[in-house]
Amino acid sequence: MYVAAVVVFAACASANPRSGDKPNDVVASSATQPTPTAAEPSPSGPAPTSSKPEPTVDFTMPNFRGMNLQDAQNEVQKNGIFFSRSHDLRGSRNQVLDSNWQVCTQTPAAGSHIKGKAADFEGAIDFGVVKLTETCP
């Protein structure tokens, strides 16, 4: 871990020094100190709470079969659901580069009405996929 040090050279000698005055020495400081500010008055009563409404979704599930997995995920996100799942239909390979996979199956099915709190659908959308060079089972 590195610590920044600020070294200030003060060579402030007045044009007419008084007797007994010495030139300023080198001053070293390991940190810059914040300038003190006036204390702010504390508000009376409890702090206001921010209650934002939970995001909701309302759309019909598109048919993603044959679509590139990355494009399918992007479409789901456009509808307000930011986390979907995918799994390899031919084994247990991980989909590291989503654009190299195609969608063969989907849950919920195409045409399903998706409506409610977005958080309730996070991870509920699942794509069964194979590599682009493979055919769907």
Image: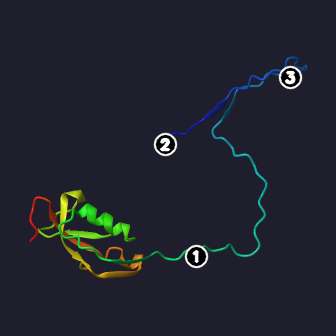
Query: Is the residue under label 1 in contact with that under label 3 (CB below 8 Å)?
Result: no
> Whole-percent x and y of residue 18?
90, 20
**Mark 3 → mark 1, Cα distance in angstroms:** 63 Å
Q: First in sequence: mark 1 or mark 2?
A: 2
Quickly name the residue at label 2. 1
Q: First in sequence: mark 3 or mark 1?
A: 3
Helix, strand or loop at disc 3?
Answer: loop
| Relative to 37, 131 lies left or right | left
Using the image as rendered, state which of residue 56 and residue 41 is in the foreground.
56
Residue type marked 2: Met
**Mark 2 → mark 3, Cα distance in angstroms:** 40 Å
Quickly name the residue at label 3. 21
Q: Residue at x 88, y 21 (%)?
A: 20
Using the image as rendered, state which of residue 112 and residue 39 is in the foreground.
112
Q: First in sequence: mark 2 or mark 3?
A: 2
Quickly name the residue at label 1. 51
Q: Residue at x 63, y 38 (%)?
A: 30
Q: Neighbour class for label 1 at 10 Å: few (<14), some, many (≥20)?
A: few
> Whole-percent x and y of residue 49?
63, 74
Say which quadrant the C terminus sits in: bottom left
Q: Quadrant of residue 127?
A: bottom left
Residue type marked 1: Ser
